Amino acid sequence: MQEFISIPTIESGIYMFGGHLHTVNGGWSFFEQSHQVIEVMVVTSGYQLTEIQGMDPIKLGPGDAILISPGTKHTNRNASLNDSMTYMCLHFDFEDVQLRSQIVGLVANKPINSESTIAQISRQMLEEIVHLSSEKKHRNDFEVHVEIEISLLRYIKQLSICIKKIDNWSKLPFSDNEATIGRNIAMTIEDLVNNDDQDISFTFQDVCNQLHISEGYGYRVFKKVYGMTPLHFIDREKYRKAQRLLKYSGNTIEIISQILGAANVSIFSKQFKKWSGITPSAFRKQNQHERHVSSKNQTGYFE
């Protein structure tokens, strides 16, 4: 008998940014913010107060962790006015809608005790990535990036295993039909952002019109499935495109801002800094060692 083993198609879509280890002085605080992705944070020394809109402050001590869901407005500050505090954090996202929804619904926006498995695997993953990033001259090496992705992928796998041990872990807040609609919305947005023949200044109403659904219904379903608003998702896709253009195309920042539909370079620069924490020119300088590739319609996509 002939043996046949099918290998699954894999589309991981790993996305991460804004990761760092930071030691802060007493009295430190960070302004209110929200992200369109999941944020994982672990305190290694001292005590932190995380304040989430509409909830009591969450106090995190050494080894404690928190996963903050997309779109959640929150502030972080050192609980002490005198003693220093050290924390590690990372913002990340991936394509698996079911696991993403389970993370948001079951473990996000809650204190995670240092003795729990989720806190321990979160700390291990962040320590691995911090270690891999510690040598500045090799931080952007391809091999280092691969190792960082492996650490994050292993962590996401471990999170999935932990979640399956939680009661009612398989119960999702959306139906199969809603999952399909949500995915269709996401794919349409991705196509509109990345298709060079399309006007990137589209609206969510344009997306819904293509799918023959109402804007209100599309908004509710997408937020239920993805845990973020459609506008946040559109912003995320534009940021990804901006990254590719800055890294791989020879276009000026002014031309890139036009491709992204920004009114001018200043607006694009402010938006990019809001997305990534650095300016487009600083991002390009960090990645200037990357090899240039042939482009399609000046976008820098691989052919």
Image: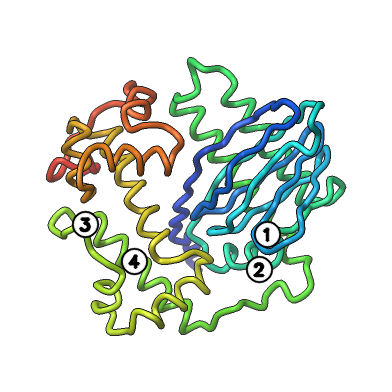
Give the residue at x 71% y 44%: 122
Q: Which mark is residue 187?
A: 4
Find out whether the residues at labels 4 and 2 contact each other: C-beta distance under 8 Å: no
Tell me the SS state at disc 4: helix
Residue 205 in the figure: left or right of residue 225: left
Q: Which residue is mark 2?
A: 105
- What's under tag 1, amino acid-wise? Ala
Q: Which mark is residue 214?
A: none
Tell me the SS state at disc 1: loop
List the single residue furthest toward the top.
137
Tell me the SS state at disc 2: helix
Which of pointers 4 and 2 indicates the residue nearer the eye? 2
Residue 68 in the figure: left or right of residue 79: left
Give whichever of discs 4 and 3 has the lower sequence position. Answer: 4
Tell me the CA gap for discs 4 and 1.
25 Å
Give the percent coordinates (x, y) of residue 117: 80, 51
Q: Which residue is mark 1?
A: 108
Tell me the CA gap for discs 1 and 2.
7 Å
